[in-house]
Image (cartoon, rainbow, N blue to C red):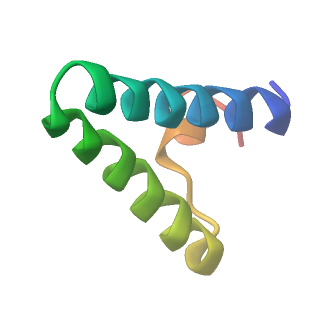
Amino acid sequence: MSDTFFYRLVGSVVFLSALAALFVNVQFAWITVFFGAHLFQFTFSKFCLLQKILGKK
């Protein structure tokens, strides 16, 4: 799997959770916060749990 797949997956989750927070319930914003925090820590540690779960080395 390429890095593009992971970027698309994370971007889609962030986008959809932002829409859900806007139109369904504001609590969906926590998903956006979680993914944003994960991307921030990735810049320091270069560790991505999603890549490990899906089997990318």
Q: Name the quarter where the C terminus is drawn.
A: top right
In this rendering, the answer to whether 44 lies above or below 28 is below
Query: Who is closer to the viewer here, 18 or 55?
Result: 18
Q: Quadrant of residue 46?
A: bottom right
Image position, residue 10 (x, y; %) = 58, 36
- Name the side, left or right, on which 18 lies relative to 28: right
Which residue does the image show at 46% across and 23% down from the upper left?
16
Q: Quadrant of residue 54?
A: top right
Image position, residue 55 (x, y; %) = 62, 29
- Name the side, left or right, on which 23 lies relative to 5: left
Q: Quadrant of residue 51?
A: top right
- Residue found farthest to the bottom: 44
Image position, residue 13 (x, y; %) = 49, 28
Q: Name the quarter where the N terminus is drawn.
A: top right
Which residue does the image show at 41% across and 26% down from the upper left?
19
- Name the side, left or right, on which 19 lies relative to 12: left
Which residue does the image show at 15% across and 27% down from the upper left?
25
In this rendering, the answer to whether 45 lies above or below 4 is below
- Name the side, left or right, on which 37 lies relative to 54: left
